Structures are given as structure tokens and as C-alpha cells.
Amino acid sequence: MPDFDVHVPDDAIRLRSYLIWQQEGRPAGRELANWLCAKAELEAEAHAHPLPRRPVTTVMPRLQISKPPDKRVSRRIGRDAA
């Protein structure tokens, strides 16, 4: 097993737990067992497929402006913000 801790978001555990509950036929009183099972499954998946260690850099393209903004629009926006 890798030597790093895995944080699984609660929302992901909640969804997986719900899916397990549905697959089991929606039994009552299995909330904790389903939660722990879902958490263990997601942690195992995260260890099997770790995220890259290097940060991913995304560069947004600069949009071309065909003409400068209308002065009236600029003044109106500035007035509303104040």
C-alpha cells in the first residue's frame, strides 16, 4: 500500500453508501456498515489509482476583443457597483 494518506470527500462516501444501500435492497439499520464499506472501497480505489504528484497547470486562452467596451456601459457598471 502506498505511504500517503487519502482523503475521500464525504459527498463521495455518501453517494457510494447510498448505492450500496440500494444494491442490498434498501435494508433498515445498515447506515454505518454501508458508510464504512463505501469509505473503504473509495480509499482502496484512490490507492490503486493515485493522482499525479505534479500540479497540473491550465492556461486559459486570451479572448480577442473586436472593439473596446462602450463608455456608457462602463459607467453604468461602475455606478451599480458603488
Image (cartoon, rainbow, N blue to C red):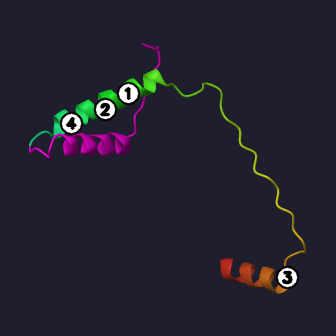
Identify which amino acid the numbered label 2 is placed on.
Lys
Q: How far apart are marks 2 and 4 (CA)?
A: 8 Å
Q: Is residue 2 magenta?
A: yes
Identify which amino acid the numbered label 3 is placed on.
Asp
Q: Is residue 57 magenta?
A: no
Q: Does dot 2 land on a helix, a strand or a loop?
A: helix
Contact check, label 3 and label 2, Cβ < 8 Å? no
Mark 4 nearby-residue class (10 Å; few <14, some 14–19, many ≥20) = many
Q: Give the range drawn in magenta.
A: 1-28
Contact check, label 2 and label 1, Cβ < 8 Å? yes
Q: Mark 1 points at which residue?
A: 43
Mark 1 nearby-residue class (10 Å; few <14, some 14–19, many ≥20) = some
The mark nearer the N terminus, 4 or 1, is 4
> On the rendered structure, is 16 left or right of 71?
left
Mark 3 nearby-residue class (10 Å; few <14, some 14–19, many ≥20) = few
Quarter the C terminus occupies: bottom right
- Tag of residue 34: 4
Q: Mark 2 points at which residue?
A: 39
Residue name at image x 46 percent, y 14 percent: 2
Q: Where is residue 15 in the image (x, y as percent from the top left)?
A: 32, 45
Q: How far apart are marks 3 and 2 (CA)?
A: 54 Å
Q: Name the residue under label 3.
A: 70
The mark nearer the N terminus, 1 or 3, is 1
Q: Does dot 1 land on a helix, a strand or a loop?
A: helix
Q: Which of 74 and 79 is in front in this view?
A: 74
Q: Distance between the residues labelled 1 and 3?
A: 53 Å
Q: Where is residue 64 in the image (x, y as percent from the top left)?
A: 86, 63
Residue name at image x 40 percent, y 39 percent: 9
The mark nearer the N terminus, 4 or 3, is 4
